[in-house]
Image (cartoon, rainbow, N blue to C red):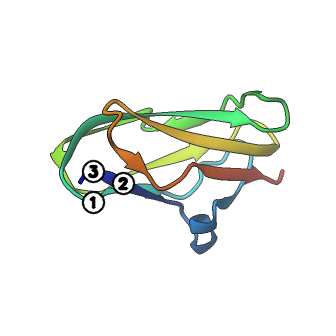
Amino acid sequence: MSASVVITGPTPTASLGAVQGQVGVPTGNFTITPNEAITCTVSFSDLSLTEQTQAGGTFTPSSLTFNNSITPQTFTYTPAKIGNQLIKASFSDPTITKSADLWVVTTH
């Protein structure tokens, strides 16, 4: 069985992929939880679905490192634009499967 991770957002609705955000204000914690010990680096990117370009938001921390670990780790996202942003998590180990990408909807 290959390793997998579940990515959850800061609110109960985040499991459905929708997270409310505000430009310039960090979201609550997103959590990446492995189903078994993994060794990899996780980097993040965002895409403005309106403009089909990078959304320019920031992630804190900018990446996560798992070293033979099953311990959940967290990150936050600070939106830079109004609109729908798709957050993507990329894993240095391509065999790790993830639950889903997460959306951040900035409202103002």
Q: Residue at x 82, y 54 (%)?
A: 107
Compared with 92, 74 (above or below) is below
Q: Amino acid at mark 1?
A: Asn
Per the model, the C-alpha gap separating discs 2 and 1 is 6 Å
Q: Earlier in the sequence, mark 1 or mark 3?
A: 3
The kind of secondary structure element at disc 3 is: loop
In the displayed structure image, the side of residue 49 where residue 99 appears, left or right: left
Per the model, the C-alpha gap separating discs 3 and 2 is 7 Å
Q: Residue at x 58, y 74 (%)?
A: 12
- Asked if disc 1 and disc 3 are in contact, CB closer than 8 Å, the reply is yes
- Asked if disc 2 and disc 1 are in contact, CB closer than 8 Å, the reply is yes
Residue tagged 1:
35
Residue tagged 3:
3
Seen as rendered, the residue at the extreme top is 53
Compared with 82, 74 (above or below) is below
Residue tagged 2:
5
Q: Dot 2, crowdedness within 10 Å: few (<14), some or many (≥20)?
A: some
Residue 3 visible: yes
Seen as rendered, the residue at the extreme front is 1
Q: Amino acid at mark 2?
A: Val
Per the model, the C-alpha gap separating discs 1 and 3 is 6 Å
Residue 32 visible: no
Residue 1: x, y in percent?
23, 54
In this orientation, which residue lies closer to the viewer: 76 or 65?
Answer: 65
Q: Dot 3, crowdedness within 10 Å: few (<14), some or many (≥20)?
A: some
Q: Earlier in the sequence, mark 2 or mark 1?
A: 2
Q: Amino acid at mark 3?
A: Ala
- Asked if disc 3 and disc 2 are in contact, CB closer than 8 Å, the reply is yes
